[in-house]
Amino acid sequence: MIAWLRGLFAALLTLASAVGPSHAGNESATSSLPVPRFVSIKADRVNVRGGPDRNHDVSFIFTRVGWPVEITAQFENWRRIRDADGSEGWVYHSLLSSKRMAAVELKRNTDLAPLYAKPNTNSPVIAKLEVGVLGTVKSCTGDWCHLAGKNFDGWVEQDDLWGVYPHEKID
């Protein structure tokens, strides 16, 4: 019975987040920031749970600091997140960072994303990034993102990244 009620509660939260915006406080508690939005994993071990409290089972665990995730709902101090594979679950707010990160995501895992010196395809290619390469988003024009990471700094086509929305502009 309790498991059924928890499932119903999670479903109602999902419905509420789809119907209207959140009207909560700040990111350290509840947030008035827009939903959905991208954030990143803050800790080296983050439990993702089936519902918004510690009584729910751990569905999976993130072990990569900086990995971008999308907040799709919020309830009190909990955020429902989605990863690049579409897996969803609930994370306690303090385990997330507002630092914008992005990971290379291409149609085929064997493809490489060109990193350009400037935001256009006529610019020199300064590196080729593998799927899963993680970087800090410095800015995005709506078509291109300035991405920096360990041993690289350049421009990647925005469509080749997970962690930014299509046509999103970031200053």
Image (cartoon, grey):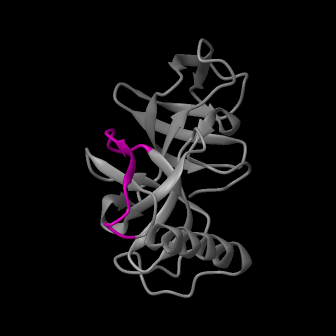
Q: Is the magenta stretch mostly helix, strand or loop?
A: loop
The residue closer to the viewer here, 10 or 145, is: 10
Q: Which residue is drawn at 37% across and 59% down?
A: 97
> Where 55 falls versus 120 (above or below)?
below
Toward the left, the furthest residue is 44
Q: Residue furthest front?
A: 1
Q: Magenta segment range? A: 53-67
148, 43: nearer the viewer: 43
Residue 94 is situated, as x and y percent measured from the top left of the image, at 30, 66
Question: Residue, x 31% and y 50% (percent of image)?
Answer: 46
Percent across and percent down for residue 155 are 58, 33
Q: Quadrant of residue 8?
A: bottom right
Viewport quadrant of the C terminus: bottom right
Report the residue at 60% width, 44% height from top.
86
Pinpoint residue 41: horizontal percent, then vertical percent: 37, 51
Q: Does the magenta stretch include residue 36?
A: no
Question: Which of these two is toward me, 134 or 79?
Answer: 79
Figure check: 145 above or below 114? below
**In the depicted structure, whether residue 100 falls above or below residue 65:** below
Q: Is-magenta flag for residue 60?
A: yes
Residue 168 position by quadrant: bottom right
Q: Quadrant of residue 72?
A: bottom right
